[in-house]
Amino acid sequence: MHSRRSFLRIASTSAAALPFLPSLIQARSSAPSAANFETLRRGVGTFTGQGGTIGWMVRNDRAIVIDSQVPQSAQTCWDGIAERSRGGLDLFINTHHHGDHTGGNEVFAAHTDRLLAHANVPELQRAASGDDSTPTYPTETYSEQWSKRLGDETVRLHHYGPAHTGGDTVIHFAEANVAHVGDLVFNRVYPFIDIDGGALTTNWINTLETLHDTFDDDTIVIHGHGAPDAGITGGRADLLVMRDFLAGLNEFVAAALEEGQSVDEIASQEQLPGFEAYAREDWPLPLEACLRAVHREQTGGGNA
């Protein structure tokens, strides 16, 4: 875990950490519609529009939404939730602070006063927002674990330390056995490693292994992002695929540093050995950014 001093240092620089956010938002650039809703199990499902995957539960007139994308797609999502639930919105949750997951928070805040996220999220939002926008912040936060019974479903939140950011949350619908892991999984595509926002790939690897051991073969896992042909839902095996990619990045950078390569030489690698399929023309995030982030982490410029 970060100390208070180191967290504030990370948060103070995170505004510069989001150069790929517009690309992530546009990665699903088709106009949002009701067709973007998919029900998975026991009233838990996904919504895809513009940005990170939204998760939701509508069951027995209880409603929960996870993440908000951007205002336009958030409104489309809310319209669909409202059609499915007569009881309003009980709870809204952010998996982390990035704008493609929080940009539409204001839409859901109009329907509930319970906006929940990890304790580090408000400061990370504040640092990343700059002077031109006012984010909609959580009204409630937690540190390590949070649990609540809503109707006949138990909702559990866990923070496992710095991974994709310094404020990641994993949400598990216990009875449905569906987990939303946010951007802890970019399914078969290059991830965004937000070093300035608290990312730590070594603990990210540990977190994915912990989640794999926590869930079972029946768990449906909702990913923050995914390749079009891989999807944004899967099983616990996908957690280890993501782990293996991060481990491969770390091994490649460590070997290159041992050979005396510069950061620019390392970052010029066009494909990561063993993960050539990740080099996709239909995905906006580059391998170069991943390599530079891990180089920072390994050489003391990150959060190791």
Image (cartoon, rainbow, N blue to C red):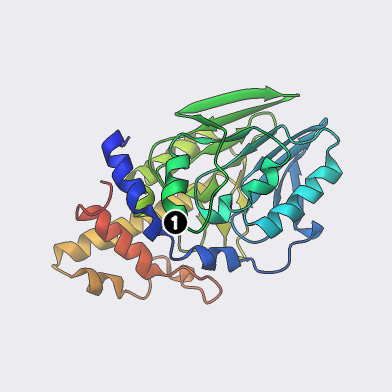
Q: Could you tell me which quadrant the N terminus lies in?
A: top left
Q: For this rendering, which residue is in front, 212 or 257?
A: 257
Q: For this rendering, which residue is in front, 111 or 267?
A: 111
Query: Residue 209, position in %: x, y?
Result: 43, 40
Q: Quadrant of residue 44?
A: top right
Q: For this rendering, which residue is in front, 14 or 36?
A: 14
Q: Quadrant of residue 220?
A: top right
Task: From the viewer's perspective, tell me whether residue 172 is left or right of residue 251.
Answer: right
Query: Residue 200, position in %: x, y?
Result: 34, 47
Judging by the rendered image, the residue that carries numbered circle 1 is 130
Residue occupying image coordinates x 61% and y 50%: 234
* Residue that lies at the very extreme toward the front in this rendered image: 131
Task: From the viewer's perspective, tell me whether residue 54 is left or right of residue 266.
Answer: right
Residue occupying image coordinates x 63% and y 59%: 231
Task: From the viewer's perspective, tell me whether residue 196 is left or right of residue 107.
Answer: left
Asked which secondary structure carries label 1, the reply is loop
Q: For this rendering, which residue is in front, 265 or 83?
A: 83
Task: From the viewer's perspective, tell me whether residue 124 is left or right of residue 219.
Answer: left
Query: Residue 84, position in %: x, y?
Result: 84, 42
Residue 108 vs 98, above or below: the answer is above
Report the label total.
Answer: 1
| Residue 240 in view | yes
Q: Quadrant of residue 81?
A: top right
| Residue 227 in view | no
Identify which amino acid the numbered label 1 is placed on. Answer: Gly
Residue occupying image coordinates x 45% and y 28%: 144
Query: Residue 181, position in %: x, y?
Result: 54, 44
Residue occupying image coordinates x 35% and y 42%: 203
